[in-house]
Image (spheres, rainbow, N blue to C red):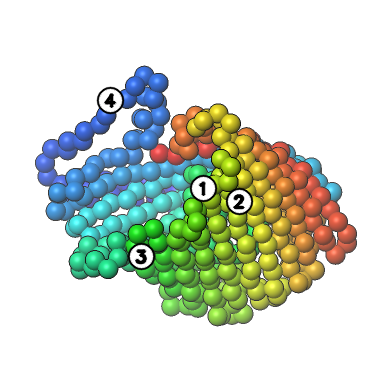
Amino acid sequence: MKNKVVTTMISAAAFAGAAYAGEVVAEQPQPTAESHTCDALKSLGKLYKDDFNPFIQEVKFFGRGQFQYGYVDGSEESEGYSEWRRVRLGAQVKFAKFFDVMLRANLENGGRNDHNFEFGGYDEAKVGVNLGKAFGIDSFDKVYLSYGRDKIEIGEDVHTSSKKIKTVERTALTGKIRPDNSTGFALSLEKGDWKGAVGVFSADEGDDEVLFDDFSSEKFFYATSTFGLTGGDLIVDLIINPDADEVDSDYRNNWATSVAYRTEVFDWDLALNAVLGDEEEDGLFYGLVVQPSKYIIEDKLEIVGRYYFQASDNESGIKPNSRVSSKALGGSGDMHHSVYAGLNYYLCGHNAKLVTGIEYEALDTPDGGNNATTLWGAFRFYF
């Protein structure tokens, strides 16, 4: 299986080369001595672009890597580990003026203390068409329809790519409301400072070693809306999963909704997120995230804080981050609190950065209260 992604990338490049006849001319600004390395990283995957070519308008490759180390000291267990958290490579081709195809694969298939580089499944794989351009729709700035394995953006920190999140890990609350990448249709719209999307996706457990999962099984429905509000952005997300009692999947929420707000307060960036949902076995759950951040050296050194809690009607309906602290905290409970403080150093903006953090967590379990402290360090890069 590990050769699938290599074959796919070579095929994409061959297809692009065959479709384009002529000399590729790309004007690149001359980088300064100080920014040469960063500029090279940012432009590394930009293979070809020509909006006037009737066959192929753009071909680009992209990739990301994240290596991290953590030490968790908890009531139930203590452990140190290293991990290649993400290693991904992808390609996108825009063709025939209105169409595009995008593929991204995981190239790490190990885990904690197991650095195994091989094909680990497709992260995203989809085809799309710009309906606004194709049919001259001028009532919206953008009308875009896609089909395939896609990322479901529910929750504030999921609307931020893993390339640009400011903490080492997203919240466990995100894991509660977000399904795995799923195969389905999505219609995206933009108008002025508003953008939104609606979609229908397969709700069953998928097979990420195939490009597209079977779409004839149970479905869930998704909607999101983002618009400007009093100097910030309000983001509202909703998932409705009518067959949660029947699906063969870890995602068993009957419904989940998220309301997030991003703004600036006294020169601090501030992200707020409130979540409410209903899980098939565990009933009602809810939570809140508060994340302030500020550069203390402009564009270089950033301080980040985060507090969140999540709670459930069920005494075992809440789980901490399963990748990091679940065992250290004793599994599951009905109330979970987390406090995080971190420093990030930007080598080349978000394209290359060091992310550090310390997190304290407390979990109310059926057997009492447990706690854990995690120390983190990570290096992230992308092109």
Residue identified by numbered label 4: 30
Picture disc at residue 189:
3
Dot 2 crowding, Cα within 10 Å, few <14, some 14–19, many 20+: some
Q: Is residue 67 above or below residue 261?
A: above
Alpha carbon distance from label 2 to label 3? 27 Å
Contact flag, marks 1 and 2 (Cβ < 8 Å): yes
Q: Crowding near pointer 4: few (<14 within 10 Å), some, many (20+)? A: few
What amino acid type should be assigned to the residue bearing mark 2? Arg
Q: Amino acid at mark 3?
A: Leu
Q: CA distance from mark 4 to mark 2?
A: 37 Å
Q: Residue furthest left?
A: 22
Dot 1 crowding, Cα within 10 Å, few <14, some 14–19, many 20+: some
Question: Relative to the observer, which residue lies in front, 70 or 362?
Answer: 362
Residue 37's spot in the image, x, y percent?
40, 26
Q: Name the mark on residue 162.
A: 1
Q: Where does label 2 land, which residue?
A: 170
